[in-house]
Image: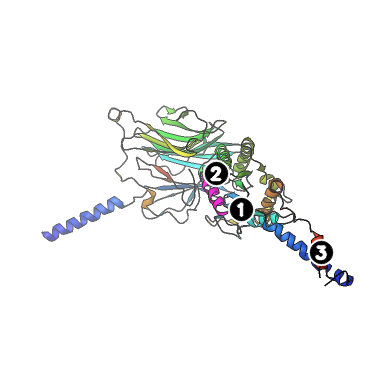
Amino acid sequence: MNFLKSPLSFYRYLPALLISAMLTGHAAAQEEVEPTVVALFGDSITVGFNAGYQVTDGNGTTQGGFPTIYLNNLFAAEPKRTVIVANWGRGGTSSGFGEQVIKDTLNDNTAMYSGKKYYVLIMYGTNDANIEIDSSTTAFNVGMMITKAKESGYTPIVGNLTPRDDQLGEIQARNPKIRDTAAAFGAPLVDHYDRFWNYPGGWTNLIDPEVGSFDGVTRRLHPNNTGYFEIAQNWFDSVLAAAIEPDPLPPPIIMVPIISLLLDD
Amino acid sequence: MIKYLARSVALFSLLLAFYSSAVFAGQAELYWIEPGAEHRIMSSEWNGDLWSAPRMVYSSENSLTSLAMVTDLDGAKLMVWSERFKARVVLMKMQRAPNATRWANAALFSDLGNENMGTSMVVDRLNRIWLFWSADLGELADVYLVRRSKQGWSEPERVHGSNQVPDIRPQVELDQDGNVLVNWQSYSMVAGRYLTSNRVFKLENPLQNGYKSGTREQVEMSIGNIALPEFLPNNVVALAHYPFNRLRQAERLDFNRRTAP
């Protein structure tokens, strides 16, 4: 087939040829992207627990819980980033617990998910007052988690605590110390409290009253789905979007060899 | 004759089993902080068969934590808890006289540190109350002790050396010789985790001091001997108090909670 002898035929097939070449080049570029791994590490708020999601442990899931899902969506949106989001939240746990298990958890995460770079999003402290951990100890434990995360080859990012109506004073006492600790240990801080507190209509629009499945008591503690979206968006906007580069664009389309093939009888 | 002996042995065995395992009224009390936006301290007593209906002992608009209870050898009760007043967490107290049914009004007990938490108390054989708690005096938490004797309450003293790590959650009991044993969690930078530290305060010569024994002979009570009431919420700050125990006089109930340390 000689397209130069049949210019109309040539132009008829050109769009299809161009599209197939672009897709071939794009597919070749995608297969080569090594993922970045982001581990979520915290308590039930990290898990994404609420009235509609009664799971207590993340167990490294890459699909369960709105914190996981919303972050996945943000990374998948253009410009796309190839990221594995693994949820290691454990409901009801304290900063002391997190400090104790972070190294083992991150080692498990590394074993499960291979990547070119590893991040851990640390958000701990909302349960501490219930087991008599004072705010300075919460901050100390967060500092130890930052240190241990770095020793495990992870880049730690710290999130402060969202409001709760039964222990607001405990949250407000801990957040400044968490902020200072993150700065002292060289980890970025993502201010979830501020995002919730200044949300249009107030933070109660992001945290519904719920009857505790463990104790039957009504309180505002776990974010609703919109609240979890705000947390995910905050992680992304504050640190992750800049820290994790978008996937490389596909290589430019090389037309000359294709035209040569088309002209070849 | 043989039948008589057999019946006697059987009766004796039954009585022995009964007295060794039965739980008498008043041997156990539960105190807990009702979770939720309303902050209340609730109580219930074991009446020998059932737990009494929960009663509110104290309520506050401030968040509460860290309950400790003690009944001295005269039967007077002292309850201490942590309460947040804005940026500070102080120790508050309430007392109840022997055989009284009502508690006296709550009052401030200590504002030693910025945050005072993790209280634990015991009565020794000289009827002194030992109160341990953790307090941060501007830096990290340390464990402190005050003692109540006939002369009143002592000044707070730190129970360990100066360090740069948290020392938290003391737990105190007596040993068989009447010595005061306290253990707490202290972070070890070498081990990279919290370890249990302890200290023993030896009882002064008991023979010379003629210490009082318990009000009646009892097998040491534990919450494992009886079922918890169904009305007790899970995952709450709760304390089991044993007024007639002479060794472990209270236990924190940290059930349904994964904690470390």
Residue tagged 2: A95
Q: From where the camera sits, is residue B68 visible?
A: yes
- Which element is circle 2 on? helix
- Is disc 1 surrounded by few (<14), some (14 to 19) or many (20+) residues within 10 Å? many
Residue that numbered label 1 is attached to = A222
Q: Earlier in the sequence, mark 3 or mark 2?
A: 2
Report the residue at 56% width, 58% height from top.
A55
At 46% from the left edge and 43% from the top edge, which residue is drawn?
B102
Residue bounds of the magenta highlight: A88-116
Q: Quadrant of residue A211?
A: bottom right
Q: Nearer the viewer, mark 3 or mark 2?
A: 3
Q: Which residue is mark 3?
A: A260
Q: Amino acid at mark 3?
A: Ser
Q: Earlier in the sequence, mark 1 or mark 2?
A: 2
Sort mark 3 into few (<14), some (14-19) or many (20+) by Cα contacts within 10 Å.
few
Please indicate, yes or no, whether residue A91 appears anywhere in the rendered image.
no
Residue A210 sits in quarter: bottom right
Name the chain letter of the residue that bears numbered label 2.
A
B97 lies left or right of A258: left
Residue A156, given in percent of the width and then of the height, sits at 61, 43
In what element is the residue under mark 3? helix
